[in-house]
Amino acid sequence: MDKPQYIQSDGLQLVVERFGSGPPLIFAHGLTGNRHVTRQQFMSLADQYSIIIYDQRGHCDASPVTDPALYDPVRMAEDMTAVLNAFHIDKAIVGGESMGAATTLTFALRHPERVEKLLLTAPAFGDSPNPETASIRAMGQEIGEIGIDAFLAAAAVRQRDELGWPEPVIDAVARMQGSHDSASLATACQAVIDWVILPDLSPLQTIACPTCIIAWENDTLHPLALAQQYAATIPRAELEMLPSLAELFLNPAVVGEIYGRFLTA
């Protein structure tokens, strides 16, 4: 595996890893995620694809971002452009999860000639506000007020006692969310959750490449209905289901397995 590289985009520094060999596949993590989570999901495909993963702006080892205006889906889509350009890649399999699915979809609509196939995990944003806007904004405010460590301690109690999350899921979420600068993550939560990336879903009809969407039930932050709308509107899309959100943390490699089957079908 190559050492992380530092790539400039929009005056910010992104941290990028590339591993494996084969056709290029770039994937962007979600809000509060990082490249380490993506690596777990896609490592199994490294013998077939050249995998490119990166910390999106304001996350993990990328430049912290505390200006809400910089958490803009078009600007973040162009971060993906900057990464591909840095590796002199004209066309790739492109994908993302949640926030990353939105930036990837924006990239695909802006640069369709650069997209070989499209991978979208847990779409959260479309043509209407996200159902969890208020709760994610409150999460961001709490992180900003008490810091990420205190937030995670309190969140673990809620996850365990109120939500009944398994300990491995609580631990995985804490590791992921604890990798960020507190002020940067607080701003991201309060800015990104307001995204409405399309006036309506009709532009999805212009996506000509094969598309795979992964979703699951009972997750209001990532509404199954939105994933189903994506799948019904994108002409060559197929929808794959996970048992639950917990599966993403208990068995992250399942993401690569699903996409691997799709890519070789």
Image (tube, rainbow, N blue to C red):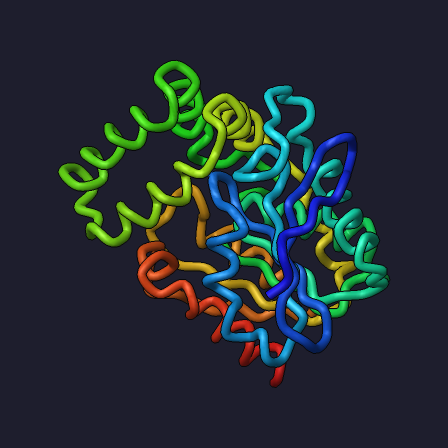
Seen in the picture, residue 62 relative to 113 is either above or below; the reply is above
Residue 23 position by quadrant: bottom right
Q: How many marks?
A: 0
Residue 199 visible from this viewpoint:
no
The x and y percentages for residue 108 are 75, 55
Query: Percent position (x, y) of residue 56?
Result: 62, 42
For residue 190, side relative to residue 93 (left or right): left
Question: Residue at coordinates 75% horizontally, 66% vertically from top-left?
Answer: 92
Q: Position of residue 245 (x, y in %)?
A: 35, 55
Q: Is residue 182 left or right of residue 11?
A: left
Q: Nearer the viewer, residue 39 or 240?
A: 39
Residue furthest to the front: 3
Which image quarter holds the C terminus? bottom right
Instruction: Please state, as top left, top right, bottom left or bottom right, where the N terminus lies in the image.
Output: bottom right
Q: Is residue 263 above or below residue 64?
A: below
Q: Quadrant of residue 207?
A: bottom right
